[in-house]
Amino acid sequence: MNLSKSKALFEEAKKYIPGGVNSPVRAFRSVSTNPPFIQRGEGCRLYDVDGNEYIDYVGSWGPLILGHAHPRVAEALKDAVDRGTSYGAPTAIETEIAKVICEAVPSVEMVRMVNSGTEATMSALRLARGYTGRNMIVKFEGNYHGHSDSLLIKAGSGALTHGVPDSPGVPADIAKNTITARYNDIEGMKKIFEVYGKDIAAVIIEPVAGNMGVVPATQWYMNFLRDITVKYESLLIFDEVMTGFRVSFQGAQGLYGIKPDITCFGKIIGGGLPVGAYGGRRDIMFHMSPAGPIYQAGTLSGNPLAMTAGLTTLKILRNHPEIYRELEEKSKMLEEGLRENVSKLGIKASFNRVGSMLCMFFTEQEVVDYETALTSDTKKFSIYFEEMLKQGIYLAPSQFEAVFVSAAHRKEDIERTIEASYHALKKIV
Ligand code: PMP
């Protein structure tokens, strides 16, 4: 596989950009391949600067549920750009997209647009703290909510201890207000609430985690979380940055039938442009400035180009519910094909999938939380990843990420992927 132009561009990039990339995972540090530099995307395909073509299962890390350069999204953007790129003043399209989100997701009665998932979760925490007058936050081991100080936290040593910074630069004074819980563990969460309940502003969860591979919370656990947060008057925040409009048009909360107090969005609602949002109960959202006293703002928030790409994407999804049915069919086909391959080759693997979010873990254990996810053989994953890339299948370069199927993948693409996976898997037998 020729990546010579990509290699040269990477070397040049490293001179001017830390690590050569604007987001760490793009550097392919967990595998030994050089990252391809991308020139163009179309449908489910990516094309790099060396002329290699890939079937893409990253989809820009989730936003591109309709595939790259969807003709209607591209057309709407071209039309919008001629009317100016930003006004810093209200526009009708902001209300239009807010309405579409509120109508789709019943727990969301009002919504505020921001520019990234990080901003959405960071602002949701400020709202939860301001609303409850409490400081402590509970998050889950292996869940990722962006890189704000309160959320870039790992577990302290032993259960029930205060969190510790997961990066230099996060003050311990901030980390101490974040408690890290084990995913799907009812008893652990009960203990946390017994000790800290009255100080907990919110529990934030990826309802279907996509940042430790794909790991869904159980229905049982979700019911419990809703009940215990109500009991202690803490807020329940769903981080649906990845799952929103992905696992269903109502997001993960539609699948679980649970109404969180606040929901964070990102990715799909921006249709490939930089967008995040947080929304929830009207009486809670009313505390945000300028309606209320809690401050949050953004020069480019509600940017007309981002709103255009997002609204066009959401309308297509709303008007074509068959997209979700087809995503389910294609993703199921991919899962079944992969399962058949590992079973033919006698490879130990375990699978989690919710709709078009899929993960094949190189472990024989059922993956239900961070600890079980970590039993995966990441060396095997790296070999698998590289062999897939050589065959033109572009996966996320880490075991602990999701495979995203898009509306642009055809059954033939899935078939080709399954066939490629058989050859790739043979290398790790
Ligand atoms: N929450 C979740 C669940 C995410 O997956 C991500 C990004 N992968 C974020 C928040 C952060 O979003 P962003 O990268 O747009 O800041």
Image: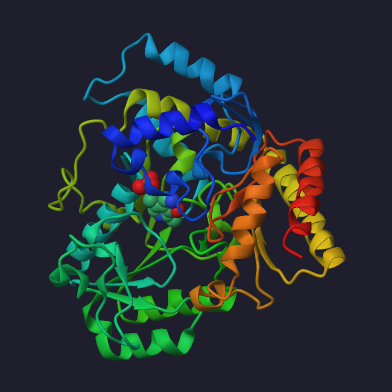
Q: Which quadrant would residue 297 be assigned to in this image? A: top left
Residue sitting nearer the eye, 227 or 26: 26
- Report the residue at 76% width, 37% height from top: 413
The answer to whether residue 308 shows anywhere in this view is yes
At which x and y percent is residue 233? 30, 76
How many numbered discs, if any?
Answer: 0
Please give the name of the residue rendered at 43% of the width and 38% of the height, measured from the top-left corner: 99
Please give the name of the residue rendered at 57% of the width and 65% of the height, measured from the top-left corner. Answer: 378
**Looking at the image, can residue 38 be seen?**
no
Residue 65 at x, y percent in the picture:
59, 39
Q: Tell me if residue 91 comes above or below residue 385 in the rendering.
A: above
Residue 106 locus on image (x, y percent) = 48, 53
Quadrant location of the C terminus? Answer: bottom right
Instruction: Indicate whether 180 appears above or below 96.
Output: below
Q: Residue at x 64, y 43 (%)?
A: 389
Quarter where residue 191 is shown? bottom left
**Left or right of 95 in this view: 40:** right
Taking the image as shown, residue 140 lies to the left or right of residue 416, namely left
